[in-house]
Amino acid sequence: MSKPFCIGPDLITDQNRALSKDLDADYDHLGVQLARRHIDLESVTARVQQFAVAIPSWGVGTGGTRFARFPGLGEPRNVYEKVADCGVIQQLCRATPMISLHIPWDEPKDPAELRAAAASAGLRFDAMNSNTFQDHRGQRHSYKFGSLSHADAAVRAQAVEHNQQVIELGKQLGSKSITVWVADGANFPGQQNHRTALERYLDSLRAIYQSLPADWHMYLEHKLFEPAFYATVNNDWGTSYWCATQLGPKCQCLVDLGHHGPNTNIELIVARLSQFGKLGGFHFNDSKYGDDDLDSGSINPFQLFLVFHELLEAAARDPAFAPAYMLDQSHNVTDPIESLMNSAGEVQRALALALLVDRERLALCQQHNDVLGAHRLLKQAFTCDVAPILAMARARAGGAIDPIATFRASGYRAAKAKERPAALNTGSGIV
Amino acid sequence: MSKPFCIGPDLITDQNRALSKDLDADYDHLGVQLARRHIDLESVTARVQQFAVAIPSWGVGTGGTRFARFPGLGEPRNVYEKVADCGVIQQLCRATPMISLHIPWDEPKDPAELRAAAASAGLRFDAMNSNTFQDHRGQRHSYKFGSLSHADAAVRAQAVEHNQQVIELGKQLGSKSITVWVADGANFPGQQNHRTALERYLDSLRAIYQSLPADWHMYLEHKLFEPAFYATVNNDWGTSYWCATQLGPKCQCLVDLGHHGPNTNIELIVARLSQFGKLGGFHFNDSKYGDDDLDSGSINPFQLFLVFHELLEAAARDPAFAPAYMLDQSHNVTDPIESLMNSAGEVQRALALALLVDRERLALCQQHNDVLGAHRLLKQAFTCDVAPILAMARARAGGAIDPIATFRASGYRAAKAKERPAALNTGSGIV
Amino acid sequence: MSKPFCIGPDLITDQNRALSKDLDADYDHLGVQLARRHIDLESVTARVQQFAVAIPSWGVGTGGTRFARFPGLGEPRNVYEKVADCGVIQQLCRATPMISLHIPWDEPKDPAELRAAAASAGLRFDAMNSNTFQDHRGQRHSYKFGSLSHADAAVRAQAVEHNQQVIELGKQLGSKSITVWVADGANFPGQQNHRTALERYLDSLRAIYQSLPADWHMYLEHKLFEPAFYATVNNDWGTSYWCATQLGPKCQCLVDLGHHGPNTNIELIVARLSQFGKLGGFHFNDSKYGDDDLDSGSINPFQLFLVFHELLEAAARDPAFAPAYMLDQSHNVTDPIESLMNSAGEVQRALALALLVDRERLALCQQHNDVLGAHRLLKQAFTCDVAPILAMARARAGGAIDPIATFRASGYRAAKAKERPAALNTGSGIV
Amino acid sequence: MSKPFCIGPDLITDQNRALSKDLDADYDHLGVQLARRHIDLESVTARVQQFAVAIPSWGVGTGGTRFARFPGLGEPRNVYEKVADCGVIQQLCRATPMISLHIPWDEPKDPAELRAAAASAGLRFDAMNSNTFQDHRGQRHSYKFGSLSHADAAVRAQAVEHNQQVIELGKQLGSKSITVWVADGANFPGQQNHRTALERYLDSLRAIYQSLPADWHMYLEHKLFEPAFYATVNNDWGTSYWCATQLGPKCQCLVDLGHHGPNTNIELIVARLSQFGKLGGFHFNDSKYGDDDLDSGSINPFQLFLVFHELLEAAARDPAFAPAYMLDQSHNVTDPIESLMNSAGEVQRALALALLVDRERLALCQQHNDVLGAHRLLKQAFTCDVAPILAMARARAGGAIDPIATFRASGYRAAKAKERPAALNTGSGIV
């Protein structure tokens, strides 16, 4: 087999060359505009450049729904090909230096080899993800009726053991955390005793927590519904918070933007969990109806901005605040690499816009009940066009000014379509 | 191969014998109670006995979600086994004499043979269902980006042709209608031009409508979202109504209880579409969050009652009003046969309760703005225990007084688990 | 002034006489039916008879919306007339021996006199309610921009002092608790710093908590939105729980059925708060869209049943579990007395139905993942007609078998329309 | 009485002078950026300058909720003072040359005098609004149980007559349309017969329609809920559309952004109604939970942009498309004049951003299923900073570059606080 196709650095240089003059002009004018508001453009750009968000390994494959999955061309067929695709995203965007693995989907034969492969693609491993929402080949007990909260102690033990193995693997891969999302719940009133189920869930979590290395974190991910359609064991931030406090300081809550009911004020949840010292992670996506796992910022970019406004508030109050960020999306009708590059940019955009908020003046308006004045400070920041900042941050870090145009120009997808002919459809592969 | 296991009539007789004395006593006392309100018990029982709701062929298999599907034992592996399972439901419940097929999932080699098999199981074929939301083996064009409203005329033509073939097949099977549900829509703002998409959808429907036999109906099924997560081509009853009026009298709207946004007043939609002469069909299920396809009446039985209250209002105003009823559920954690028998009973229960409403007194209360009086008439009907009516209707028609207990006593599922060892997982198979 | 009109005990006796024969027959047959399921009718009736739910003083006036209020005839014009109306409700229903007052709306000149008036109407005082969501005559600072969480310490101090005065008054009236609901929040992103606002709210609560007598409780009532339309200070159960734990054991959470987002599983919140030892009170009403304050059980009676199923679960695990129950409704188009009598009955109905659940068999089904079996146990209980139990409980306690018919026969409303000519419109008066 | 305080033109000139240099620089650089995309800055500015949105007369007063209303200083006490405030908005913004009156709130003694007063403030009268959701002094029948759809023909006749009088008044004021919003509906299942109610509503509308002058339009405004909390007579766009088609070409539908259920895709409703030829008007506001009537663009500015994208699509297909635009907001915690000026700017911003969409390239992406490409064209437009366009459009028309800063500098509010001491609280005054 010949060497897999790679995007050469020259392409990026060439593509950037054509755009750099306009970028410089726009960047400079933006600097002048921001200087009038006493904002230093360079420090914003630097903050954007430092920002990093993880790519989930399953995100580079095409997602699907319960109705169908329409595979794309050249999809990665194993964890090494997933690493390769994530490497391209990082190569062009310079904002995604981490991969988040999903076990057993990504179980490597040789962890050291996988770690080396990632390193050579400029990547390291972020939070590990366990999977007890599917039945895997060779598994003794089924998770049809639950896993960590199952009525049968043997099933719970199996699920606990799986999580412990994921931690073991993560240690070899250099990860420092595990995200626990379970699908446990009920489809019918009466199916479960809500209190007993939560007690069992907590007991199982305790056993996993005991296995955590000293420098690791465990993230609890709540979800209102799906695949359980009447009640979920860890269904909201309040439940997640309570569990995390029962377990200890290494356990934190993870907020996924799509795991809430209609009309939920998610930025308020960010404020709450960070105020209570339990916000550990964030999964970015967007949605209009349910947990749609659409691309970040594609439906409600102002909400994403308000979330970052709260994240910056938390960081301002606690310099140690550093949650784990990940893009958790399902790419059903787009090229996953393109969507992830675009979404990394949207998340950076929200950060950049939130950095433009004049927090001192905002506090003054709030103190004097100048409601419209306070609101307009947010809108003044939000309506700024920070595209030059994002492009400059990428270019300075060696990435592409226009990552999608560069990706399309590279021929990467067509090359992979040839290299990876047999798309394996191993489940829908969506979280 | 030996003859497949069947439930013998003696079992039903035996099981009923043990229950009939109590049933008679309860039935008689209910008659006394209703007589005080000038309601004739026997005419209610007769109406319940006449009621029929179709079983979708795919409903007898275990459903799933985008995360996983956990197959049950002894699932039907082909359309003949589906017919057999539907036959058992009808044998025990006597409320489900029709099957609704899904093509190509249920495509028979010999339609006449299939029709005979159904007839011998006491079943006939209700509305046919086409499928352009999945890519099928040997299909020229993909439906990844739409079907009846696809940007490419060739894809639209393929989807139209498929629907026409479904009609042809339905003619041979004795069906008189086709239900058209398409998954077409968009996941991103900008993905589609909403107006162009609707124009194309309507054009395609016109071509299908042209192929309808004179005595057939075409049902348009709207859905707010899923699998399209930002916009759907036929997204609400208003759009569906408009399309149906553009096409002509043979085209009607079909309401699925789960295809609406949060807080939607669905009984009001029933009132609207029947008032405007376009309510042709109904898919029963229940839901708490999205289109959860839970068992009918399991989450909000009062809503189901209010829907039947409107259906009876429509029938009172127009004796020819006779929509096509179907149970459209996804059975993820229950035995599908049990769930469907139970759900048929829940739908009958809602009908029976609605029949108890004193419509004359209700109209008087409404006319005099006795708001609480009017409401209490509905609640008085709803809080009645009509279980004896349902059981008596079943027993008189030759079914089981307690269908689920009888089914469990029969050993049917265990027998099928042996007869049908290889569960074929042909897609998630859920609509 | 002549003596106010009262309903004489003879009327109740006369009305009951006409209904008692049928009631006896129905009650006896229900006893036979329940005995088959090993349920003792009499113990259910006894539990229903013991149940008590408070009437809010403002509930006996006609409610309104931001668009209009349409007063009814003979509305109470002061706290003594409110007590009289509440007395009638208790006289006929025998389920509502407590009133919940709202200060300053109900501020008495002579607390001892008011307490005596209530006692002579067979009533005692339940939780006191403070009001910092309106500006009252003579008040120094406005609550336009908040109260307990206001940016200005002087406004916060005023709001704290008001709550302390309400506690003082409650002590004189024999109350043992205060419910704190504040309207504080924001209408615009940026209006408030969510964390600072919660800190201030908690500080103010601490000051009130310090003033609580040893045998009192303080109930925190969360609300998702309205009158604040973007963010609320105590917006969900998680926030409420956190605040209650910060304050101490005398502080508990109160759940109002209408204060949640669409699709929220409220019975799960009941399970959570009781499991965590912080469920102190419950406000009953029903809603279809927002915080509609409709009559209890009028929109989703199955949800009300499931809530009581959880309340009984909590009581089964902790015999000391005894939350404060209140009907919190807005009667815009009905006679408030009729609505409250009807609603008390609906709440009792939900209790009675929940008492019919076979909890032992349910636990067995849950343990063995007989999902449909478990669910059907709930539905079997819910579909029972317990009207005879409710009527018998009322009759045995000296109330009316049919309270609304008896009320209508009494001429009470017409008499009050004459006695109370000048309907005072002192605000919309709704919580 | 001395002459009321006015803002002199010199203030605007002075304020603008200080800002014009930076504005020119920003405007020029934006022109360069847009030219790269082949967009002509000047034609965008011209389109923005032509845009007009009406101010509702009641919008210049402080709004409230069912809980409380906190009046602001210097609120207008009659229609002439409302006209004065609207005149200031137009003076500074140059985007709001119309007022929409509400009868009987704004009933003038001398219509000609009012018309002259408006003209001298640079204003004309847009759609008239009738009011049958409140009981007005001297009114014979109450609207407690409905108006146009009331069970009693006499009430319906009174409501029809009121609407006819509003039309008569509008003719004298130079208006050309009437907006009919009714609060009719039900709070309880059973309260109304949904079909009968709609029939009566339509009959009443027919009578009003008969009174419409030949060059007038009638706008039907649907609303999901509030103040009716279970069912509304004109509850959704489908119902509104059906009614409008029954009445004739002079009847059109009006969409209010806040009158829909959670998760509703409102831009799709805009597409539908314009495609079907029945979109006549638009009420702008924003909301997070219900019909919150928050300031336009304050919660979901991307949605507002997508709405304008559809409005431009409609205009591109039909040059005669010209719906009536109005700001329909409730200003509870801000200065109403400031909020309305800011909101006019937000609506203009959405228009300006939508004008930047490259519709030709978008159609190409859509035709070739380049989903991300299509979406990015929308986002590229939306993320542009068009503040210089809005400011330049205002300045060129004689308005203020920064209207709110200029308003604050003017001392207008303080002057009015003195001139208008007695704030009349005539109802909450919110629609």
Image (cartoon, coloured by chain):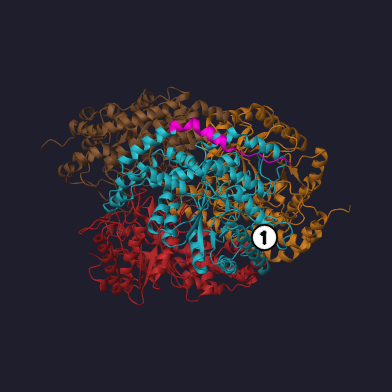
Chain colours: A red, B brown, C cyan, D orange
Type of residue at label 1? Tyr
User: Is residue C25 placed above or below B63 in the rendered structure?
Assistant: above
Could you tell whether B169 is left or right of C327 in the image?
left
Residue D254 in view here: no
In the foreground, B161 or B21? B21
Q: Main secondary structure of the magenta part?
A: helix
Label 1, secondary structure: give it: loop
Q: Chain of mark 1?
A: C
Q: Is residue C410 magenta?
A: no
Which residue carries the number 1 mark? C143
Instruction: Examine the image and state in which quarter residue A208 appears.
Output: bottom left
Above or below residue C411? Residue C378 is below
Q: Is residue C81 left or right of residue C194?
A: right
Residue at 46% from the left image edge and 36% from the top image edge: B306
**The N terminus of chain C sits in image quarter:** top right
Residue A200: image location, x then y, percent: 32, 61
Q: Residue D271's x, y, as percent?
A: 53, 42
Taking the magenta stretch, the answer to whether it contains residue C16 is yes
Q: Is residue A150 left or right of residue B206?
A: left
Is D91 drawn above or below residue C246 in the view shown? above
Quarter of image, res C137: bottom right
Residue A183 x %, y %: 34, 57
Residue pushed farthest right? D1
The residue segment tinted magenta is: C1-22
Q: Nearer the viewer, residue A64 or B304?
A: B304
Residue C161 is at least partly visible in this image: yes
Q: Position of residue D176 (x, y in %)?
A: 71, 36
Q: D133 or A282: which is nearer to us?
A: D133
Q: At 25% across and 63% down in the image, what residue appears? A: A158
Crowding at dot 1, Cα within 10 Å, few <14 / some 14-19 / many 20+, comes out as many
